[in-house]
Image (spheres, helix red, strand yellow):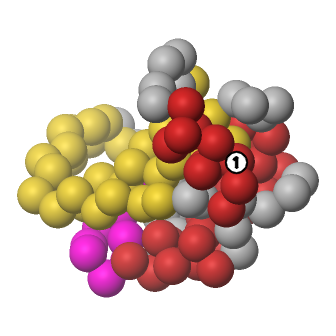
Amino acid sequence: MDNPCLVVLITAPSVEVAQEIAEALLAQKLAACVNVLPGVQSLYTWEGSLHRDAEVLLLVKTRADLFERQLVPAVQKVHPYDVPEIIALPIQMGSQPYLDWIEEVTATS
């Protein structure tokens, strides 16, 4: 595998927004797979106040070379938050056929 793979975590305010983000990433071949996990409770400080919100978590499988220049702007284009959570974790190990599939179905950078 030439390009390291990532799991990208993105929170969204609703299942509908999460699905819109997921579909945009898949349509642009910026993700191989997106899991949409509803029922996340997020506690955070924003503009000096403590917030507790129900959110949806997206787990996006992609390539590292797509993250900064393509995936992040694509998410920001459709995401309603001023500062959306878009963080990436490297996949240290995984089934080689699965990692090869991620590389095969995502866009060439």
Q: Residue at image x 26%, y 73%? A: 14
Q: Is residue 49 magenta?
A: no
User: Looking at numbered disc 1 in the image, what kind of residue is underneath it?
Assistant: Glu
**48 above or below 61?**
above
Which residue is at the front of the view, 48 or 86? 86
**103 above or below 1?**
below
Locate residue 53, reporting x and y percent.
17, 55
- Quarter assignment of residue 6: top right
The reply, left or right, for residue 49 in relation to residue 90 is left
**106 above or below 93?**
below
- Categorize mark 1 by other alpha carbons within 10 Å: few (<14), some (14-19), many (20+): many
The reply, left or right, for residue 77 in relation to residue 42 is right
Looking at the image, how many numbered discs can be counted on the residues? 1
- Quarter assignment of residue 15: bottom left
Residue 89 at least partly seen: no
The residue beneath circle 1 is: 103
Q: Residue at image x 72%, y 36%? A: 64
Q: Residue at image x 42%, y 60%? A: 34
Task: Determine the secondary structure under disc 1.
Answer: helix
Locate residue 82, reporting x and y percent.
54, 60
Q: Quadrant of the N terminus?
A: top right
Q: Residue at image x 64%, y 80%? A: 27
Locate residue 18, reporting x and y percent.
37, 71
Residue found at the very far right of the displayed protein: 109
**Region in magenta:** 10-18
The reply, left or right, for residue 49 in relation to residue 53 is right
